[in-house]
Image (cartoon, rainbow, N blue to C red):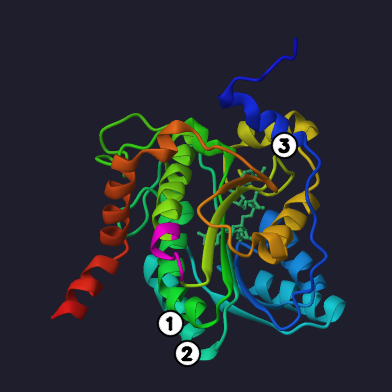
Amino acid sequence: MRFELPEELVFLKNGRAKQKKSTTSMKGKTAVVTGATSGVGYEAVKALAAGGCRIILVARNERKAQAVKEELEKKYAVSVAYYIADFSDLASVRAAAEEILKDQEKIHVLVNSAGIHSTKKTYTRDGFEKVFCVNHLGSFLLTRMLLERMKASSPSRIIQVNSEGHRFNGLDPEDLNWHRRIYTGLRGYGASKTAQLLTVWQMAEELKGTGVTINAMHPGGVRTGIGSNNGFLYRWFLRHVTWHFLKDPVISGEAVYYLASAPEMEDVSGKFYNLTVEEKPAKHALSRKNQKKIWEKSLDMTGLSEEKRTDAI
Ligand SMILES: NC(=O)c1ccc[n+]([C@@H]2O[C@H](COP(=O)([O-])OP(=O)(O)OC[C@H]3O[C@@H](n4cnc5c(N)ncnc54)[C@H](OP(=O)(O)O)[C@@H]3O)[C@@H](O)[C@H]2O)c1
C-alpha cells in the first residue's frame, strides 16, 4: 500500500521534488525586483541578469543597492537601475513607483521579494502592523501602480514571493492591525502572506486576456537574512539550529527564473508554486469571502480606492 501524505503536508514532499529549470534567454526583457539586496531577491536578480535581463532594483538601502548594481553590471554586462523605497512607508513606495513609470518604458517582469518576519508587533508611521505592511501592502501598492505599464509591455509576468508560512494563517479581515488579538510572529507572518495570496487570485481574474500573468511562490526554506531583525535568542536558534535544515538560496533564484522565463509558464496565472511545483494553498487562503474583503481593505489601506473615486468624478 502506498502512503499518501495528508493534503496539508504535501508541501513537505514538493519542497524535496526535482525542480524544473529554464534555459530560455531573457535578453530584451526588463525586470523590476524588490528585496534584491539580500537572500531570495538577490539570487533572483543574479539569475535574471545571467539570463540577459535588464534589472531595476527597488531597495530601501542605497549603499546596498549600489553594490548590487555594480556587481551585476560587472559580472553579467546588463544594465541595472535602482529606486529607493521603504516598504514600511507606503508614501515612499508610491514615490518610487512614480519615478519608475517616468523613466522606464517597459516592464516585463515584476518580482516582489521584499519581506520580513518579526516576533514583535510594531507599527508603521501610518499605523499599520509592520509585517502586514512590508509583506503585503507594499507589494500590493507597487504591483497595482506598475500594472498598466506591464499590460503595455505584455507578455509580462508578476511573481509574488510568498511563503508556506501562509499556512500559519492569522488573518482576520476585521483586525488586520492586530489591535484585538494576541500577536505572534508566526501568525503575523501568516496573515500577511495569506492576504497577499488572496489578492493574487483576484488580480489573476482581473488580468485575464491582458497578457499579464500573476503567480505566487514559496522560495524554499533557504539560508537568508530573514529574521535577523529579531532578538538574540531568535537569531541564535536560527544560526545554530534552523540553519542546518535550510538550503542554499540559489534554488530560489533558479525557481524565480523558471517562473519568469519558461515558455510553458507564459499563460499560467493565479497559481501557487512551491519553488517550481504547483501546489494547493491552505484552505483559508482560498476563501472567496475573505478575498473580497481583503481586496477592498488593501485598496483602502494603500489609498488606491480614493484614487478610483477621484478618477470617477
Ligand atoms: N528565507 C526563506 O526560507 C523564506 C521562506 C519563505 C518565504 N520567504 C520570503 O522570501 C522573501 C525574501 O526574504 P529572504 O528570505 O530573502 O530575506 P532577507 O535575506 O532578509 O531579504 C529580505 C529583503 O527584503 C528587504 N526588505 C526588508 N524590509 C524592507 C523594507 N521595509 N523596505 C524595503 N525592503 C525591505 C531587505 O532589504 P535590506 O537588505 O535593506 O534588509 C532584503 O533585500 C520574503 O518575502 C520572505 O517572506 C523566505
- Quadrant of the drawing holding the C terminus: bottom left
Q: CA distance from mark 1 to mark 2?
A: 6 Å
The disc placed on residue 98 is 1
Up/down of 131 relative to 138, above or below:
above
**Boundaries of the magenta span:** 204-209
Up/down of 117 relative to 258, above or below:
above
Neighbours of disc 3 within 10 Å: few (<14), some (14-19), many (20+): some
Q: Quadrant of residue 107?
A: bottom right
Q: Residue furthest left?
A: 313
Amino acid, disc 1: Glu
- Asked if labels 2 and 1 touch by Cβ distance under 8 angstroms, the answer is yes
Q: Label 2: which residue?
A: 102
Closer to the camera in the image, 98 or 13? 13
x%, y% of residue 41? 67, 60
Q: CA distance from mark 3 to mark 1?
A: 37 Å
Residue 228, can we see it? no
Q: Label 3: which residue?
A: 15
Residue at the spot 55% in from the left edge and 37% down from the top edge: 280
x%, y% of residue 92? 42, 72
Up/down of 280 relative to 249, above or below:
above
Residue at the spot 24% in from the left edge and 66% down from the top edge: 305
211 lies left or right of 89: right
Return the disc, 3 or 1, that comes first in the chain's sequence: 3
- Asked if labels 1 and 3 touch by Cβ distance under 8 angstroms, the answer is no
138 lies left or right of 126: right
Return the disc, 2 or 3, that comes first in the chain's sequence: 3
Neighbours of disc 1 within 10 Å: few (<14), some (14-19), many (20+): some
Neighbours of disc 2 within 10 Å: few (<14), some (14-19), many (20+): few
SS under mark 3: helix
- Asked if labels 3 and 2 touch by Cβ distance under 8 angstroms, the answer is no
Amino acid, disc 2: Lys
